[in-house]
Image (tube, helix red, strand yellow):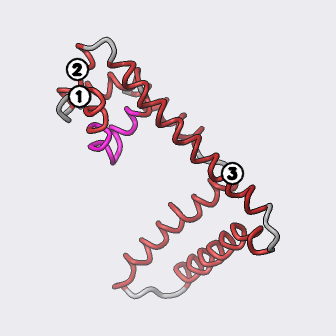
């Protein structure tokens, strides 16, 4: 797998990141399907080494991923523009109300988790909820309102490529 990652990081950095991440199996399968080889690292590495067009095929997958990310941001912007053109107050402000309610819930939960006694049987549940609130809910709102962390991801990818 290491040799595959080394090949991918130069040709298709997003694929290298995906293959090294928690969904690596899916990324390897997608690469194998694109190259028409069995879905294992050795077969993919051999196919890339033997086929001068393999780099182009992988770059196409990388480009397609970038296009999907751009479309996702465009869809979020279009949704907000359409909401702002509505007549009703709630339609115009739904995303702000939604984010405010979740933020207030998060604050209340963090306060309760910090200052109220938690029974030993519930500690793991509280830890999980705190992780979900921070890792997905609040992060998602910040990404929506202030932009995604694509720049941060790109920096992380560059650091990963530089250390391997």
The front one of 76 and 117 is: 76
What's the CA distance linking mark 1 and mark 2?
9 Å
Rendered image: mark on residue 47: 2
Residue 1 x/y as whole percent: 23, 31
Q: Is residue 133 magenta?
A: no
Residue 106 x/y as whole percent: 59, 74
Figure check: 100 above or below 72: below
Secondary structure that dominates the magenta span: helix
Q: Left of 114 or right of it: where is 28?
A: left
Callout 3 secondary element: helix
Please give the residue where the numbered disc 3 appears in the rendered image: 77
Say which label, 1 or 2, has the lower sequence index: 1
Q: Are marks 1 and 2 in contact (CB under 8 Å)?
A: yes
Q: Residues within 10 Å of mark 1 (few under 14, many from 20)?
A: few
What's the CA distance linking mark 1 and mark 3?
37 Å
Q: Residues within 10 Å of mark 2 (few under 14, many from 20)?
A: some
Q: Are marks 2 and 3 in contact (CB under 8 Å)?
A: no
Q: Left of 131 or right of it: where is 70?
A: right
The front one of 153 and 48 is: 48
Q: Are marks 1 and 3 in contact (CB under 8 Å)?
A: no
Figure check: 149 above or below 164: below
Q: Residues within 10 Å of mark 3 (few under 14, many from 20)?
A: few
Seen at 25% across and 32% down, the residue is 32
Q: Nearer the viewer, mark 1 or mark 2?
A: 1
Rendered image: mark on residue 104: none
Seen at 64% across and 53% down, the residue is 76
- Magenta stretch: give its range: 15-28
Residue 118 x/y as whole percent: 44, 85
Callout 2 secondary element: helix
Figure check: 140 above or below 39: below
Seen at 40% across and 36% down, the residue is 17
Rendered image: mark on residue 36: 1
């Amino acid at each position: 797998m290491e040799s595959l990652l080394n090949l991918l990081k130069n040709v298709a950095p997003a694929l290298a990141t995906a293959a090294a991440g928690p969904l690596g199996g899916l990324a390897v399968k997608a690469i194998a399907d694109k190259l028409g080889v069995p879905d294992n690292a050795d077969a993919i590495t051999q196919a890339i080494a033997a086929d001068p067009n393999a780099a182009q095929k992988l770059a196409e997958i990388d480009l397609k991923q970038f296009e999907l990310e751009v479309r996702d941001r465009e869809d979020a912007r279009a949704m907000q523009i359409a909401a702002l053109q509505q007549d009703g107050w709630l339609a115009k402000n739904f995303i702000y109300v939604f984010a405010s309610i979740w933020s207030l819930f998060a604050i209340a939960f963090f306060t309760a988790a910090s200052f109220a006694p938690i029974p030993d049987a519930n500690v793991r549940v509280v830890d999980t909820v705190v992780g979900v609130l921070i890792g997905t809910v609040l992060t998602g709102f910040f990404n929506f309102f202030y932009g995604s962390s694509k720049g941060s991801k790109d920096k992380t990818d560059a650091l990963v490529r530089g250390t391997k």
